[in-house]
Image: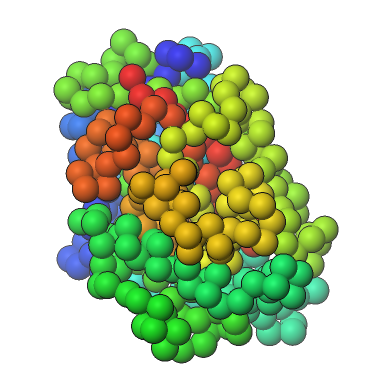
Amino acid sequence: MRNVMIAGIAEPVHGRIPGMTPMALHERLALQALADAGLELSDVDAILTLAPRSDSYLIHAAAFAEYLGIAPPITLTLEGGGAAPAIMVDMARNMIEGGSAKTVLIVSADMPLSVNTRDAYVNTLADSGPVHPDIERPFGPTVPSLFGMVARAYMEEFGADETDLGAVALHDRAAAILHPNSHMRAPMDLAGYSASHMIADPLRLLDCSPVSDGGAAVVVTTAERSGKGGKRPARVIGAGFSTTHLHLSAASSLTKHGAGLALDRALSFANRARDDIDIALVYDCFSIAMLINAEDLGFAEKGRAGAAFRDGEFKRSGRLPINTHGGLLSHGYPGRAAGIGNLIEAVVQLRGEAGPRQIPDAKITMTHGMGGLFATHGVLLLEAT
């Protein structure tokens, strides 16, 4: 695994991206990431994509290769939800170590804000997302309402309140203000958070990720090909995954899920320990997702993550910096591509290019992604070179 590197990255400013189709956004990101890596389209042996909700194709990766005018041997479109970035990088690692590819282009982008509209996208999540069509959908739940149910269960079990949820939203916004690509950069205080309207009790508007256009591209390649663009590559050292259910009605618990299992497996693969992690990028589509995932990952005791956020333990100067880019809550939630921003921030930090967000001497990052309602989890460990 020490021969596999992330050599190139690209990310747009999240929010509304005017005057561009989803396929054109994929192309722009791909070309920028390849230029960042110092490589050409002709170097690409494999393309991995997610199927964006804003642009439907039978095999999206093949359509994208056709759009680019190239014919790599491998074109795969995955379905992994928010765990997909870790899945795709680990698939690229397997291809490179197995000899079927030397350079893998990963592009994950979506434009639900410009192409679908926010309300249509939320309705689509309920119709074709992680809501069981027979057991759950007839009773009318939306994805936000199911996360709200989880939040209420968490409050009842651990005695948490809205200040715990608000601490996550405030933490992410403070970080996003320092990131030029973030969707939500306006300052926020607790009063502003508390004044935001209720979406799915107890979750307020600012407990929910914004619907964003955006995404990213990543170039994974061999150590020999990395560094041609003059940028410091990030070494892929471990990956781990877990699946516990798809529909929330099948989950064994509402407040404990599989993120920690995925991290355990990644650490075992990399022969590392939790104390080796310098920065954690945690999937937080809703504030309650951050509280539960941070605890399941072992970064706080159950029921104590809110207090840890309030006390500054996860700030840039804290014991473990978390979501230094603002997370999904403020950096942005670009539909199917949600979560790849965590991976981009990990690489930027390991390169030492994060500017005012930079964590000094960061050596190892953990990128976590989650699919569905705590259903699937993917963890990726990267190391500075």
Q: Is residue 254 left or right of residue 372?
A: right
Identity of the residue furthest to the front in this view? 311
Quadrant hosting residue 329:
bottom left
Judge whether residue 229 can be spotted in this image: yes
Residue 110: image x %, image y %? 37, 58
Which residue is drawn at the image coordinates 75% and 50% (left, top)?
244
> Which x, y percent locates residue 65?
34, 38
Instruction: Give the quadrant of residue 185.
Output: bottom left
Question: Horizontal placement of 134 versus 145: left or right?
Answer: right
- Choose between 259 and 339: the one closer to the eye: 259
Residue occupying image coordinates x 55% and y 70%: 164
Picture quadrant where residue 17 is located: bottom left
Is 287 rendered above or below residue 192? Answer: above
Q: Can you see residue 108? A: no
Q: Point out residue 41 in the picture as x, y percentages from the top left corner.
A: 24, 29
Q: Residue at x 44, y 56 (%)?
A: 312
**x and y percent of residue 239 in the render?**
56, 31
Q: Where is 9 relative to 221, above or below?
A: below
Question: Looking at this view, is 338 or 193 the one in front?
Answer: 193
- Name the image colouring: rainbow
- What residue lies at 63% left-to-right and 44% top-to-bottom? 298
The quadrant of the rendering that contains the C terminus is: top left
